[in-house]
Every structure is written in C-alpha cells, then in structure tokens.
Image (tube, rainbow, N blue to C red):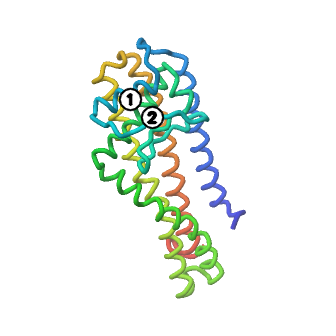
Amino acid sequence: MIFDPLYLLVIGIGMGLSLYASAITKGRFRKYSKYTTRSRLTGADVARKILEDNSIRDVRVEAVPGELTDHYDPRSKTLRLSESVHDSNSMAAFGVAAHEVGHAIQHAKSYTLLSFRSAWVPVANLGGGLSMIVIFLAFLLGGAESATGTSLSWLGVLLFGCTTVFTLVTLPVEFDASNRALVCLQKGNYVTEKELDGARKVLNAAAMTYVAAFITSLLTLLYWAHRLGLLGGRR
C-alpha cells in the first residue's frame, strides 16, 4: 500500500502544497516584519485597542515563545501572540495580531462556524485517531468485496472524513477573522493604506496554509475511498 503510485502521488501533492504554503507564509511574514508602521504601537497594543473598540474587556493578551505561534484560546479567553508579534511595530505584526483579535470578536459574537469548529475538535481528533485502524481492518477483510469489509470501509472513510470536515470549516472561519482584522485596522485608523496592504498580504499568505490542509485532507479521503473500492471499483 505504501508503494502504491497513486498513494505516493497524493502524499507528494499534500507535502508539496504544505511546504509551499508554509514557505510563502514565513517569507511574507519576515518580509513585512522589516517594515514598521507610522504608529508607535506594538502588536499587543493594537490587539488591546481593537478589543476595546469592540467592547471586549474580558480577553487577556499575553506573549508566547516561538514564531507564528499566535492563537486565540476561547476556553480561557486569552489571546497569545508570539514575541515577534507581541513586541513588534511591523506591518506583519499588526496583521497577525488583528487576525487573532478577529477570532476573539467571532467568539464574543457567537459566530456560528467558530462555535461549530470548536465543538467539532474532539470529533475530528477521535475520527483521525481511529480511521486508519478501521481502514486497515477493512483492507484485511477485502474492502468492498465483502459485506463486513464494505461496512468497515464506509466506517473508516466516514471517520477520516471528520478531519476533512474540520479543515473545510476552518476555511471560512479563518477568512472571516482576516476580513474582520483588516476592517478593524482601517476603521481604527491604526495603519495607512500601504501598511494595510502589507498586513493583507501576510494574512493572504497565511490563508494558503489552511487551503493546503483542506486539499490534502480531501485528496487523502478520496484516495482511501477509491483504494477500498467505494469509488471506481476495487483497486
């Protein structure tokens, strides 16, 4: 199975997309980290100001180590910014900080897709953990060539599909957070048009990583369905 040319192609495409998206994101971030904004604010300052602009006063902003480790934790209502964002005055820092605040705004406004994604996390984790075990058992029983194998094949594909659903729902959640970020930066007059364009380019590059994750998951899902004989006959 590991030497199946189609499997190697799927894995190759997935790895290629992920590496490309990651390289573009890191490249854009480092490029626009060199361009400072006209203000004397840091990424943390901008995050706090946008939170205040949106009447959100129960979210903490703190620094975390690493590069591009920024995230919003809805459980503790904590916005964690990497040191290169938290303490920076760059276009890149403003874009990333505002994006994470975008998630906090989604949370405060009970954005449906964010709520669904958060609730779906344990489902996706469970499905991802069990899917390969079930798929392996389905192979041992002949896949779609036997009744039990067919049942296990569908179960394995459905379990793996839970992770694909997660990557799909992540797309509009991330795009919406970026849109909110850019609107807040502009509305608050925290950046010039040129600075806003730099922040936008960083966020657009970051969005590619989520697109790559979804495409990779979808291709893998289709591969297993095909390999088990659920699509196009037994292979």
Residue 26: image quadrant is top right
- In the rendered structure, the answer to whether residue 199 lies left or right of residue 18 reads left
| Residue occupying the point 50% across, 76% down | 155
Label 2 sits on a secondary structure element that is strand
| Residue occupying the point 45% across, 57% down | 166
User: Horizontal and vertical percent for residue 174?
Assistant: 41, 43
> Where is 163 relative to 89, above or below?
below
Per the rendering, the mark at residue 59 is none
Query: Which is more N-terminal, label 1 or label 2?
Result: 1
Q: Nearer the viewer, residue 132 or 148?
A: 132
> Label 2, on which residue?
61
- Amino acid, disc 1: Arg
> Where is 68 relative to 193, above or below?
below
In the image as oriented, which residue stretches furthest toward the top?
38
User: Horizontal and vertical percent for residue 22?
Assistant: 58, 38
| Residue occupying the point 30% across, 49% down | 111
Tag 2 and tag 1, C-beta contact below 8 Å: yes
Residue 192: image quadrant is top left
- Amino acid, disc 2: Val
Instruction: Report the number of discs.
Output: 2
User: Horizontal and vertical percent for residue 15?
Assistant: 62, 48
> Where is 233 relative to 21, above or below?
below
- In the rendered structure, the answer to whether residue 147 lies left or right of residue 193 reads right
> Label 1, on which residue?
48
Q: CA distance from mark 2 to mark 1?
A: 7 Å
User: Horizontal and vertical percent for residue 168?
Assistant: 42, 53
Report crowding for label 1: few under 14, some 14 to 19, many 20 or more residues within 10 A (C-alpha).
many
Label 1 sits on a secondary structure element that is helix
